[in-house]
Image: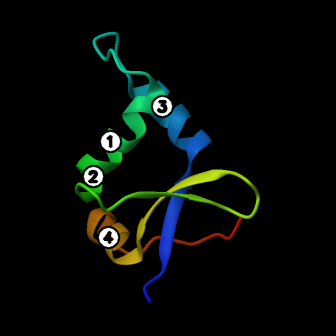
Amino acid sequence: MEGWSGVAAGQLYFLIKELKTPADTQSEDQLKISLLNLMFGEGKVHVKKHSNGKDYYCASITDWTKMLGKAPKLNDV
């Protein structure tokens, strides 16, 4: 089975907060999955709970590599 990698929900929140404009009417939390669906494709992102109790928005390593143009550096939290 292929591995997964993700970004912490909190990190994603602050990234979106920095990019969001007054014209964006959805909250940062509502925009998380919309943004990632645009990046990876509909249905390719899953929210997974880490053993540390935090939510991570995850996609397959293959999908991250396609999106980034190279394999991501992985850090286990």
The quarter in which the C terminus is drawn is: bottom right
Q: How far apart are marks 2 and 4 (CA)?
A: 9 Å
Q: Name the residue under label 2.
A: 39
Q: Please state the horizontal and vertical placement of residue 31, each as a whole percent of the image.
A: 38, 33
CB atoms of marks 2 and 1 within 8 Å: yes
Q: In this view, does 28 lie to the left or right of 22?
A: right
Q: Mark 2: which amino acid?
A: Met
Residue that sits furthest to the right in the current view: 52
Q: Please state the horizontal and vertical placement of residue 52, each as a whole percent of the image.
A: 76, 58
Quick one: SS at disc 4?
Answer: helix
Q: Name the residue under label 1.
A: 35
Q: Mark 4 points at which residue?
A: 63
**Which is in the foreground here, disc 3 or disc 4?**
3
CB atoms of marks 1 and 4 within 8 Å: no
Q: Mark 3: which amino acid?
A: Asp
Quick one: SS at disc 3?
Answer: helix
The quarter in which the N terminus is drawn is: bottom left
Please tell me which of labels 2 and 4 falls first in the chain: 2
Q: Mark 1: which amino acid?
A: Leu
Q: Distance between the residues labelled 3 and 4?
A: 22 Å
Q: Is residue 16 above or below residue 45?
A: above
Please tell me which of labels 1 and 4 falls first in the chain: 1
**Which is in the foreground here, disc 3 or disc 1?**
3
**Which is in the foreground here, disc 2 or disc 3?**
3
Q: Distance between the residues labelled 2 and 1?
A: 6 Å
Q: Name the residue under label 3.
A: 29
